[in-house]
Amino acid sequence: MIAINYEWTKDYPEASAGMLILSDIRNTDGGKQMNKVKRELEKNIKHKYSDKTRNELKTTYPINVYVTYYKKFGYSYHVLLQLESLIKGKPIPDVSAPVEAMFMAELKNGLLTAAHDFDKINPPLSCKISQGSEEFVTLNGKTVSTVEDDMMICDADGIISSILRGPDRRTAVGASTSRVLYTTYAPPGVDKSLVMQHLDDIESYVKVFSGEAKTEMKKCIHD
């Protein structure tokens, strides 16, 4: 377990955050079984969405919630773009298996999620609203400023992710990672039961390639 301060209520009532901590993960190639699950997921997603236009996809729950959130700031929801690419035939990419598990659940459920090396986290975690002046280093090594009024998650050392800027580099999942913190952003309009289902899916995907993984925490945090 980990202490979590929740400060989204004033600006984003009804928002929530999904938190999943898994330990004893073997951070290796997902193997044949993981590839089989990926191909099956791709098939199911194509069957579900292949006849939909882009506008229809944008209005599909819960993608529509994120589209509305991103549009408020002048951005496009990148998971929607990734979903469109998959429908057009681009396979789920081969990256580190713990990150693949997250990406698969994102495509299946449409919920924005980040993965972090839990051993690099300095508690407590805080769900905050950005001022637009904070800075952090993203996965690509670029230092970025936050966008004012964006939802972000921090630890005692700084920002670990925000909706619009993505995850940080400091706590990124690496080859030696064995404990992973998955954080899911659920703006107002995303049902809390879907957040929990999404965490269940990540957990099940991780156990495809790492059956001995243990769940240290799984919860939906809100006020």
Image: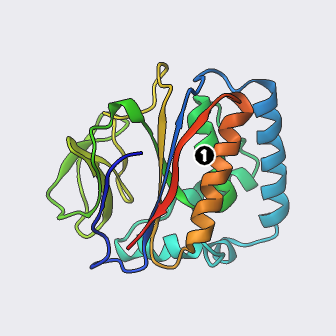
Residue at horizontal 70%, vertical 27%? Answer: 30
Query: Does residue 183 show up?
Result: yes
Residue 134 locus on image (x, y percent): 17, 53
**Amino acid tagged 1:** Phe
Q: Under tag 1, what secondary structure?
A: helix
Q: Which of 176/218 is in front?
A: 218
Q: Is residue 158 left or right of residue 84?
A: left
Label 1, on which residue?
Answer: 103
Residue 101 locus on image (x, y percent): 63, 41
Whether residue 75 is situated above or below residue 211 in the rendered picture:
below
Residue at horizontal 81%, vertical 25%? Answer: 32
> Given the current orientation, which residue lies at the most extreme left position?
133
Q: How is the image coloured?
A: rainbow
Residue 199 locus on image (x, y percent): 60, 53
Q: Which of 119/114 is in front?
A: 119
Image quarter hosting the N terminus: top left
Residue at horizontal 76%, vertical 72%? Answer: 52
Residue 133, image quadrant = bottom left
Whether residue 171 is situated above or below residue 144 in the rendered picture:
above
Q: Is residue 196 left or right of residue 72?
A: right
Whether residue 124 is situated above or below residue 47 in the rendered picture:
above
Image quarter hosting the C terminus: bottom left
Q: Which of 106/153 is in front?
A: 153
Circle 1 residues within 10 Å: few <14, some 14–19, many ≥20: many
Query: Does residue 92 show up?
Result: no
Whether residue 145 is situated above or below residue 212 in the rendered picture:
below
Q: Is residue 65 left or right of residue 165?
A: right
Residue 212, image quadrant = top right
Residue 210 locus on image (x, y percent): 67, 28
